[in-house]
Image: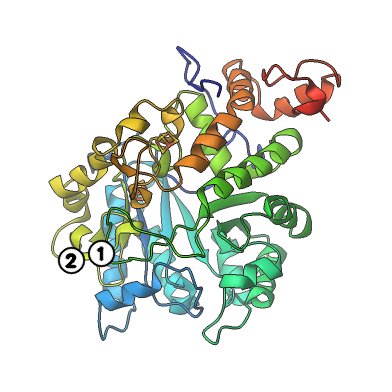
């Protein structure tokens, strides 16, 4: 295994596009923690995923971890009131520094609230934003309820819409089913076509699981070539049999992605992307990795040393430590009785964020790719290390394989950026290499058996 460390003494890189270092050069991307500049009213800027319908959804995806959260609020209608909507936006936007402020909606299925709820949300948000703030609106949806009316609103306010698609219909429909267990791809693709017809910015969120883990290029090419999508997120499905908490030795359902297959999936997509699509297709996980190779903080919380600044707001004002920890032990409080700033800066939330680093097992601490992985998300740390220490990430084998595999090209792109050039110039370097030349990625192999074409 090559030793993958960030370049020594790496100078901070100027990212040449808002879409990260590897996306289209003119495309804005919302998401991630706001920049820590301006006049903060909270000690740290934070990000919130608001769930106006709580876990309520019109579909019944088999792997959805959120549907079971209905049990947290028995008998509830699961609809955010207008009063709470106004209070949330006033507190949240008011606490953010000047600059870009991301207002993010998620579910459940947030479009179940109806278009008028979002019209009211936009009006409130615009009325409370300060002159120095630019609002970026995002919404994550299954796409099945979208109409022309929805898309007009989303386009007018330049929403970035995340739409969930797991690949071609035969893969998507394996687990993403409606309440009767029927396929959903037709409705999703109709929603996507509407978004594209209205010129809405779309980001596809693809979960990787047992049904599509062995078809990486079919999935990737379907998004790129058949659907014309250029912003792609891959999320591994790790679904524990025991969903009542984190217990050492948890097993996973047979829908979950296999750790080695997760690594192979990412490797295969990366190999195609890095020679053909850097600069035209943005793959969130690859861009996040490049930040680590540039010596910057990863753009994804799962790959940062600590976390705790990405929270989840339930429909009734309950604020939780994270979208993946919406459970009683991680309820911080309700924003109608304690301000969000107090909750975000509370000792409980600080401890939650620090625990990501504090609980890292020895195997991770001495791992060659720790700088890029940091043990990934604590929610997946339920296996043991080679020497029996608890707390190793279930996906470790996949991440170790992936981060090792991409080391050469990542070093090359980081080098380009440090020289004030574009990451996408890597494609030209690969294309120019003769078949028998050493591959520009530095692997020591001939280009024809590495990244040459
Ligand atoms: S628990 Fe995981 S998903 Fe949540 S903020 Fe931390 S790293 Fe991110
Ligand atoms: S989870 Fe695995 S790959 Fe990631 S830092 Fe730990 S040992 Fe390394």
| Label 2 CB sits under 8 Å from any ligand 1 atom | no
Q: Element type at marker 1?
A: loop
**Vertical position of residue 382 compared to residue 408: above or below:** below
Q: Give the label on residue 171, or none.
A: none
| Residue that carries the numbered disc 2 in the rendered image | 336
In-front residue for pair 349/395? 395
In-front residue for pair 72/136? 72
**Vertical position of residue 347 compared to residue 168: above or below:** above
**Can the viewer see residue 428?**
no
**Can the viewer see residue 7?**
yes
| Label 1 CB sits under 8 Å from any ligand 1 atom | no
Determine the residue positioned at 30% across, 76% down: 81
Q: Residue 334: percent from the left, percent from the top?
A: 18, 64
Determine the residue positioned at 67% across, 20% down: 443
| Residue that carries the numbered disc 1 in the rendered image | 327
Residue projecting furthest to the front = 387
Residue 205 vs residue 377: left or right?
right
In-front residue for pair 94/404? 404
**Quarter occupied by the N terminus:** top right
Q: Residue 438: percent from the left, percent from the top?
A: 76, 15
Q: Residue 107: percent from the left, percent from the top?
A: 42, 68
Q: Residues within 10 Å of mark 1 (few under 14, many from 20)?
A: some
Residue projecting furthest to the top = 9
Q: Element type at marker 2?
A: loop
What's the distance in space between the residues labelled 1 and 2, CA to CA? 19 Å
**Which of the 4 image quadrants contains residue 152?**
bottom right
Which mark is nearer the camera, 1 or 2? 1
Q: Residue 279: percent from the left, percent from the top?
A: 69, 36
């Amino acid at each position: 295994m090559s030793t993958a460390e960030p370049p020594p003494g790496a100078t901070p890189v100027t990212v040449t596009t808002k879409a990260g270092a590897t996306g289209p050069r003119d495309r804005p991307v919302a998401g991630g923690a706001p920049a820590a500049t301006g006049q903060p009213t909270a000690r740290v800027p934070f990000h919130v995923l608001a769930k106006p319908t709580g876990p309520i959804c019109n579909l019944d995806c088999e792997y959805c971890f959120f549907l079971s959260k209905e049990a947290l609020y028995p008998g509830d209608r699961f609809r955010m009131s207008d009063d709470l909507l106004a209070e949330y936006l006033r507190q949240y936007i008011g606490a953010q520094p000047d600059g870009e402020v991301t207002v993010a909606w998620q579910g459940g299925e947030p479009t179940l609230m109806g278009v008028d709820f979002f019209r009211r949300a936009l009006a409130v948000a615009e009325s409370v934003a300060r002159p120095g703030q630019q609002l970026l609106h995002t919404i994550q949806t299954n796409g099945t309820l979208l109409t022309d009316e929805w898309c007009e609103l989303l386009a007018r306010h330049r929403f970035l819409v995340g739409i969930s698609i797991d690949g071609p219909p035969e893969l998507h429909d394996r687990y993403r089913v409606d309440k009767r267990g029927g396929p959903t791809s037709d409705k999703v693709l109709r929603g996507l076509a509407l978004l594209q017809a209205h010129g809405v910015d779309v980001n596809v969120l693809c979960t990787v699981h047992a049904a599509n883990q062995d078809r990486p290029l079919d999935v990737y090419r379907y998004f790129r070539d058949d659907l014309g999508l250029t912003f792609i997120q891959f999320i591994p499905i790790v679904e524990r049999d025991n969903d009542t908490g984190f217990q050492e030795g948890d097993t996973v359902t047979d829908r979950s992605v296999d750790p080695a297959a997760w690594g192979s999936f990412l490797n295969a997509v990366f190999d195609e992307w890095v020679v053909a699509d850097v600069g035209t297709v943005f793959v969130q996980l690859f861009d996040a990795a490049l930040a680590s190779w540039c010596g910057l903080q990863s753009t994804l919380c799962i790959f940062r040393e600590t976390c705790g600044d990405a929270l989840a707001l339930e429909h009734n004002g309950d604020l939780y430590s994270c979208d993946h920890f919406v459970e009683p032990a991680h309820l911080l409080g309700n924003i109608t009785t304690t301000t969000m700033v107090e909750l975000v800066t509370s000792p409980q939330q600080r401890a939650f964020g620090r625990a990501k680093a504090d609980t890292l097992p020895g195997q991770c601490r001495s791992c060659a790719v720790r700088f890029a992985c940091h043990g990934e998300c604590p929610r997946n740390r339920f296996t043991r290390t080679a020497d029996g220490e608890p707390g190793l990430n279930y996906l470790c084998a996949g991440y170790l394989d992936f981060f090792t595999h991409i080391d050469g090209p990542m070093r090359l792109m980081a080098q380009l950026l440090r020289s004030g050039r574009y990451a996408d110039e890597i494609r030209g370097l690969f294309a120019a290499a003769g078949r028998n030349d050493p591959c520009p990625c530095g692997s020591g192999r001939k280009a024809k058996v590495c990244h040459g074409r």
